[in-house]
Amino acid sequence: MGYIRLIGHLNLLNLFARSIKRCGYELQYYGKYNPKPKISISNPLSLGYESLCEFLQLELKEKVQTDEFIENVNEDLPQGLKILEGALTDIKSLQKHIGYSEFLYIFPGLKLQFNDFEIIVRSFFEKEKIYIARYRKMGKKKIPYEIDVKPLICNYRAVSQGSNLQVYLTLTSEEGAYLNPGALLRSFLKDAGKDDTKFNDVDPDFVHILRINQYDHQMKEIRICDLKDR
Amino acid sequence: MIDQNKLYKILNKVDKPARYIGLEKNAIVKDFDNTDVNFCFCFPDVYEVGMSHLGMQILYFLTNSYDYFNCERAFAPWVDMENLMRQENISLYSLENKRPLKEFDILGFTLQYELSYTNILNMLDLSGVEKRASRRSEKDPLIIAGGSCGYNPEPLYDIFDLFIMGEGEEVNIELLNLYRKSKKLGDSKDDFLKKACKIKGIYVPKFYDVVYKDDGTIDHRIKFFKEASEVIEKRVIKNFDKTFKLTNQIVPYIDVVFNRTMSEIFRACTAGCRFCQAGMIYRPIRERSVSNILDTIEENLMNTGYDQVGLSSLSTCDYSHIVELVDGFIERFSDDNTSISLPSLRLDSKGFSILEKIEKLRKTSLTFAPEAGSQRLRDVINKNISEEDLEYALTKAFDTGYSSVKLYFMIGLPTETYDDIRGIKNISVKVKNLFFDNPNKNGNLKINTSVSCFVPKPFTPFQWEGQDSISEFEDKQSFLLSIFNDKKINFSYHDSRTSRIEALFARGDRRLCDVLIKAHEMGAKLDGWNKFFKYSIWEKACEEFGIDMDFYTLRKREYDEVLPWDFVDIGVNKKFLIREMEMAKLGKTTRDCRKGCHGCGVNERICKGVYCP
């Protein structure tokens, strides 16, 4: 994705809205005094992460030819952003149809035997409870606390790709049960540092976090045209 | 090119990284190594501020419309980014080609306000460019400046190789063309500067020196280069309707100060407020035609995808075809969810009739700037807004559902007394009563009364006046604090210390250049941001060079004193400014120049404006 990963969620929505407008399409606006276009992205990604699979839902004033629309908008979008496929749909909210996200951590520059790496990864993810740090706000004070996110982790797999060590992760990704892969990464690095000091030198900001795919509640691939509101 | 791997890494660590990546829609990336002249437009503040500056967008697209010129952009990084750049040894770079600024032929800074001066030095420092023009080598880029603060260029005389006075659309291109020729000829910097100073509007400070009297005032100026002119005349675009049209804008990825297309409707202002520099230096009034403006808006919307249009000028209502323009806008754009923003709208009956036309407009906050608390003092400063005007506007505003009001005032104006200051509270209370007495009121009343400190500016009738001392300002502020005890009115005031430094540089001379460089070395930067401004640094820097701040800020000047900026000709003559100052002393107003010419001189010396005889 390159630099485009550094655009925040709301800015990304603006970017798409403007791009669509530049291509001559009209978004449907709602609201009286400060009308806003109807456009949303499910499961917003944190700033700095990359993704191969995002779902964008929008409403246009007039019916369009999907392929032509995608072609035109893709031509206008900046490098690093591309609409892969699209379909007309009647569903109200895409978000409700998504159950899981698959992520990939890439650790550039981490020099470790793959076997050692795998053992450390396994010992972390096989723990009975996995805590991540959170903050609760009390007035202006931030009070730290920890929660167990083990139930939100469905799958993990350590791999070695070229010279990079990587971890594939499937996490639940639905309303009220969304696990941020960045928070989990910090927790992992802290824990792994106890087994091998090399992890202490890994800056969590320099680990690539990439969303590979999103699945429905049955952990199946999502095809927009097949989706129906129940 | 800078090390993109390093950059890629540090961008994960900074706040709002999209400030530093470029690649926005409509940004122009040219082949750096195969363009005749590489120019970098440097804005000495953060990205969000700079990207809302219309002048930069105009000059960017204008310059890039020539194949052989490449114009890129650079902004001041925020502290977190700056620290990482220094730590990782990354030079300040241009957003387009990610080139270190040192590789450019010319770096052009815009001078929008005095407190950004230290950012200029910091940007040069981050680029590894020597700050003093006198110490830079042939290899260093040419460092130039323009913009409203440049009308008194003297405090920056040893930082810039040259200054551009006035509007840039013509002179910038003339200068770049000359540079292109000079580069081909292999001219030295000096050769180039000797040619450049012959272009009208170009000031090369190294060709002059200043001799001071024993009392510290200026005795006379000396010229080192015979052919350089004594007086530098500002440049204006005579036919504003025919000049370069901005039909495209860079669309930032992140929210900036203004997230909309901007369309300039006219230049200058006829009100003649005596404290206002913009009201004098931009004269005369020149307008764009309605059809021209509407066409530009249409093209702009198509190219940017924005859904809001801002009309830009110093006073929207004073555009002679404003009703026609708003009607035309509604007819052409109201169907496609495009809204219009009318800043600087004076709320008289005409202003309201326009507001009513734009029904969809959100009932946000209304802003009034009476500037002074009493009619007497408003007459002194020639701010022609009466309490009846305010009453009319607010009654109408509250009738139509507005409930949030901002009031702007100044303290420290010439002839001010505590009665005038008390008036600031009285007006605020009056606004409150107007709301609660209004049977049609709606919503929750919010009044924000903001009081700033008067800074005397060059080229205004008040340019000879002294500024209040910090203790005088603070006494007035505590007085206001003690009388403002109303929950509905939120009272705030500006730090008098920042206003003092502004005043120091606004009317400063060459001797302040050392102070500025020293202050930067001692850590001054981002002075426009309260949390970074450190007054003690400036005190120490002044002390080191024996500079008495009071001499520049508190001192009242005589009319016959040679002022540091006297060699710049803005078209408005000194006689007019003196006459205005004398009228101020008598408490007499001068009517808007649309109602009759007062002979400021701009029509004879520069060009005629829309209302000039």
Image (cartoon, coloured by chain):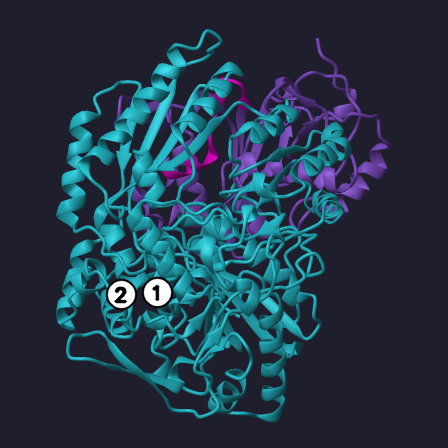
Q: Chain A: what color?
A: purple
Q: Position of residue B553 (x, y in %)?
A: 22, 59
- The answer to whether residue B105 is visible is yes
Whether residues under marks 1 and 2 lie with C-beta atoms below 8 angstroms apart, the answer is yes
Going by the numbered disc 2, the residue's amino acid type is His
Task: Give the distance between the C-alpha atoms of the residues marked 1 and 2, in whole angstroms.
Answer: 7 Å
Which residue is tagged 2?
B520
Left or right: B311 in relation to B215: right
Left or right: B284 in relation to B331: left
Quarter of the image where one finds residue B309: top right
Q: Quick one: SS at disc 1?
A: helix
Which chain appears cyan?
B
The circle drawn on residue B122 is: 1
- The answer to whether residue B90 is visible is no
Quadrant where the image shows the C terminus of chain B: bottom right
Q: Position of residue B120 (x, y in %)?
A: 38, 65
Left or right: A75 in relation to A41: right
At a point 41% along the width and 48% down the height, the residue shown is B273
Q: Chain of mark 2?
A: B
Going by the numbered disc 1, the residue's amino acid type is Asn
Quarter of the image where one finds residue A111: bottom left
Q: Which residues are magenta?
A: A173-186
Choose between A16 and B334: the one closer to the eye: B334
